[in-house]
Image: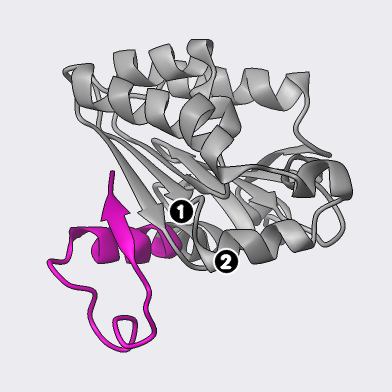
């Protein structure tokens, strides 16, 4: 009999975004065989030359989906009110110029199945799904987004099926993708002004 921690599918932990967590992410993306789906606040790391080129290359093999908070939406302004002063000075125009525009250009011109979406609602954690692994980064108060701990979950086993943790986080990504794919956001989300739009 497995204990609740062993049966949770928890594979790894990182205290914050550091060299080890970045290496783990790159390795997972490089080895992806079926899908790559990312969701989070700014995803600045995706805009670096190394990762942008890797995502474009992988989009020739598997679908790549990246969901980023709209840099001009009220939720992003509100999030940065909670971050330390050095992070709260984030400039949306600079983000567009240095991260989002190069990333969306690469997605459109790379020749693969690479789509980037903007959403306009708050988020308390980031999710990075590659195949049957989910990395979850927590966003805290008074901390940079990159200061949050990262939990790495596996899907589960063939015998036992998906874990409740996997089901929860995968359902979050499925909900966001559903909004992105809809011609018009269904209620109650439409009446609340929730938007997920492709760049």
Q: Nearer the viewer, residue 106 or 137?
A: 106
Mark 2 or mark 1, which has the lower sequence index? 1
Q: Where is residue 140 in the image (x, y as percent from the top left)?
A: 79, 59
Residue 71 versus residue 21: which sits nearer the camera? 71
Q: Are marks 2 and 1 in contact (CB under 8 Å)?
A: yes
Mark seen at residue 70:
1
Q: What is the distance, in whole Å, between disc 2 and disc 1 at their CAs?
A: 8 Å
Which color scheme does this rendered protein use? Answer: one colour
Residue segment shown in magenta = 171-199
Q: Which residue does the image show at 78% across and 26% down from the upper left?
A: 18
Q: Which residue is drawn at 69% across and 43% down?
A: 90
Q: Position of residue 60 (x, y in %)?
A: 21, 17
The image position of residue 62, as x and y in percent, is 25, 27
Outermost residue, front direction?
93
Q: Is residue 1 visible?
A: yes
Quadrant in which the C terminus appears:
top left
Answer few, some or many: residues within 10 Å of disc 1's Cα (few below 14, many 20 plus, some between 14 and 19).
many
Q: Dot 1 lies on which element? A: loop
Residue at 39 percent of width and 35 percent of height:
131
**Residue 150 percent coordinates (x, y):** 71, 43
Q: Say whether residue 152 is left or right of residue 127.
A: right
Question: What element does badge 2 sit on?
Answer: helix
Residue at the disc numbered 2: 75
Q: In this view, does 54 lie above or below 91?
A: above
């Amino acid at each position: 009999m497995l204990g609740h921690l062993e049966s949770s599918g928890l594979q790894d932990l990182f205290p914050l975004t550091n060299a080890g967590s970045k290496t783990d992410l790159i390795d997972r993306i490089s080895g992806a065989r079926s899908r790559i789906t990312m969701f989070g606040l700014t995803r600045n790391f995706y805009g670096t030359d190394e990762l942008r080129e890797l995502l474009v290359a992988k989009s020739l093999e598997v679908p790549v989906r990246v969901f980023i908070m709209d840099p001009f939406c009220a939720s992003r302004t509100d999030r940065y009110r909670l971050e330390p002063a050095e992070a709260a000075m984030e400039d949306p125009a600079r983000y567009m110029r240095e991260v989002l525009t190069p990333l969306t250009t690469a997605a459109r011109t790379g020749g693969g199945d690479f789509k980037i979406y903007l959403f306009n609602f708050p988020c308390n954690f980031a999710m990075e799904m590659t195949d049957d692994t989910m990395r979850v980064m927590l966003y805290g108060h008074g901390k940079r987004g990159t200061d949050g701990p990262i939990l790495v979950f596996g899907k589960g086993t063939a015998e036992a099926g998906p874990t409740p943790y996997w089901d929860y986080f995968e359902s979050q990504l499925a909900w966001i993708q559903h909004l992105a794919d809809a011609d018009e956001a269904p209620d109650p989300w439409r009446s609340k002004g929730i938007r997920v739009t492709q760049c």
